[in-house]
Image (spheres, rainbow, N blue to C red):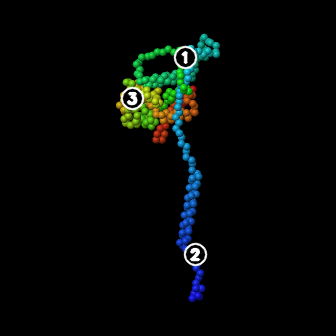
Amino acid sequence: MSQKLASRPAPVLRDTLYDRVSSWTIALFVGIAGLCLCVVAVWLTNRLPPPPQTVPVELVEAPGGFEDGSPDETLRVDSPEPEVHDASPAEVQSDVTEIAEALETVVELSESATQQVQQQFDTGIQSTGKTGSAKGTGKKGLGIGPGTGGMPREQRWYVRFGDRAGVDEYAKQLEFFGIELGALLPDGRLVYLSKLNQPTPVTRFVASGKNEQRLYMTWQGGDRRSADVELFKRASVDVRGDTAIFHFYPKQTETMLAQLELNYRNRPVTQIRRTYFAVETAGSGYQFTVIRQIHY
């Protein structure tokens, strides 16, 4: 019995196939988990910071000035050159000077017409066809105001819509920027036109425009006024050839135009006399661009 026990081999511990497969599986899982952690760590350390959120800024202007001049003031300016009674050909203006003066006259007439339309829009009165008269002293006008000078936006801005686009395309441009049409009727009422891209625009009537606070512009030229007349016809509003038509700009669009004007040449508004905008296609929509500026 003792010989049989002595002949048995001693037990030996060894790895089985199950142990080897399990160890390789655990090692592979731990390796993949560590690799994923490394990838996540690299991604977190290389993330870009979120872009700062811009705060919309409204550019507020206060055109005007302070009281200037006196009742007895004259604008006489003596020339440093000796007086010559016989005019010579040297005093004849060049073509460039004449063209510049003609352009200046056209601009002044345009400003005068804009002011007359604005007065008619604010008060709702009609022209009686009678001519007026006034005498001037040639002196500088007096005025009181807290502004910093410069021309207001409605007299400084000129917007050009493409003449080649059809009426439907033109209506989409106006609707894209939230521009509302208006017309001063012969009875003194003001009619608004919105939803311009619809087959029949929506109309709204008010007694007068004295409570209107939005920026508005009137036509100074071009062929696009006929497109406005067509849009009014779609809404069954009879607009005559001498009817004043207005474009009312929402505050958001006005602020956008002011920012474009400022970014064009980085000039303060007190130095800008004219800014010309044009409407262009941008992707699926439209955008305003500054095409020209005239400075003092």
The quarter of the picture where the C terminus appears is top right
Write the residue at 41% across / 26% down.
208
- Of tags 1 and 2, which is closer to the observer? 2
Residue 38 locus on image (x, y percent): 58, 57
Tell me which corner region of the image, top left, top right, bottom left or bottom right, holds residue 85.
top right
Q: In this view, does 239 lie above or below 43?
A: above
Q: Distance between the residues labelled 3 and 2?
A: 100 Å
Mark 2 belongs to which amino acid?
Answer: Arg
Quadrant in the picture for residue 226: top left
Q: Could you give the CA–CA distance between mark 1 and mark 3, rounded to whole angstroms?
A: 40 Å
Give me the residue at 42% from left, 35% from top.
171
The residue carrying mark 2 is 14
Farthest residue, direction top: 85
Q: Against 44, is 134 above or below?
A: above
Three-letter code for the amino acid on which mark 3 is drawn: Val
SS at mark 2 in the image: loop
Identify the residue position indicated by label 1 in the image: 139
Residue 25 % position (x, y): 54, 67
